[in-house]
Image (cartoon, rainbow, N blue to C red):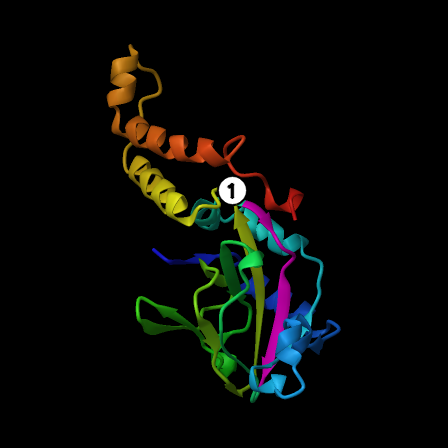
Amino acid sequence: MTYLISKFFNADVAKTLESKIKDADWYDGLESLFINARDSDKNPYLLKDNYQADMDPTQMFEAMDSNDEFLNFTFPNHTKDPLFTKTEKGGHYSPHFDDVTNGQFSTTVFLSDPKEYEGGELVLYIRGKEEKFKLEPGFGITYETGTPHCVEAVTKGQRIVSVFWTTSIIWDIEALREYRYWNMMAGRYKPKFVYDNTIDFVNCLHNHFSMKADAISRKFAIYYPPQKLSNHH
């Protein structure tokens, strides 16, 4: 699985957060572009036309820490402070991929009700084709950083989302995929509380698969499970 759709907030919390963000101090989204996108012979607004705002990230980090699906998918070590973006009518973000220094995973959490704006779909290029996403408020999509993507032009209303980037404890993406697989397999079986001997313990399928997952995590992690993101950003 190259992306994960998961719930960070319920709709009411997402709406409250969106309302707070609307009153934020917005600045031109071009400020987050790399310097080479500002070359004098290029019009950067052809690449990107939106607004950004910096907000207290506490609520977002708390949502990440309570989202087990997100934690199991990314096995996070560090997440950059979330960036809030607003895309109004005519705004867009042309096809690009996020810089490798951002980490292993990119996440977009949708805050606006999709019925209140038109266009603005997040488009990911996955397995040779485009997949479009326009999620309900409070739901986010996490995908591997480096995936080509864009935001289609908003044709009505405004689209407000939160975006952030996560570095995984298991920095090798292939090893992380294997870890997730064994962890998923372990979750399919229920272990006993007490075993009479180590042979029975090892032959339990939950423990068998858990050991495979743990062997991978030990190569990269000093401890298990991941640290709270609110303490490491």
Q: Quadrant of the N terminus?
A: bottom left
The quadrant where residue 198 appears: top left
Say if 113 sits above or below 69 in the image. Answer: below
How many residues crowd around disc 1 within 10 Å: few (fewer than 14), some, or many (20 or more)? many
Q: Secondary structure at mark 1?
A: loop
Name the residue nearer the viewer: 64 or 34: 34
Give the image location of residue 126, x and y in percent: 35, 67
* Percent x, y of residue 114: 48, 76
Question: Residue at 63% of width from left, 68% of height from top?
Answer: 84
Q: Is residue 27 left or right of residue 7?
A: right
Q: Nearer the viewer, residue 100 or 71?
A: 100
Residue 62 in magenta? no
At x 69%, y 70%, the residue is 53
* Front position in the image: 43 or 92: 43
Residue 86 occupies quadrant: bottom right
Q: What residue is at 65 percent from the left and 57 percent from the top? A: 81
Residue at (46% x, 31% y) in the render: 218
Against 85, residue 181 (above or below) is above
Q: Main secondary structure of the magenta part?
A: strand
From where the camera sits, is residue 138 visible? Answer: no
Identify residue type, mark 1: Ile
Q: Which residues are magenta?
A: 77-88
From what the image shows, is residue 134 above or below residue 213? Answer: below
Q: Is residue 212 visible?
A: yes
Which picture quadrant has residue 143?
bottom left
Q: Residue furthest top?
A: 196
Q: In this figure, which residue is indicated by the disc labeled 1?
A: 169
**Residue 107 locus on image (x, y percent):** 51, 61
Q: How far across and down, in percent of the image, does residue 26 sit? A: 72, 75
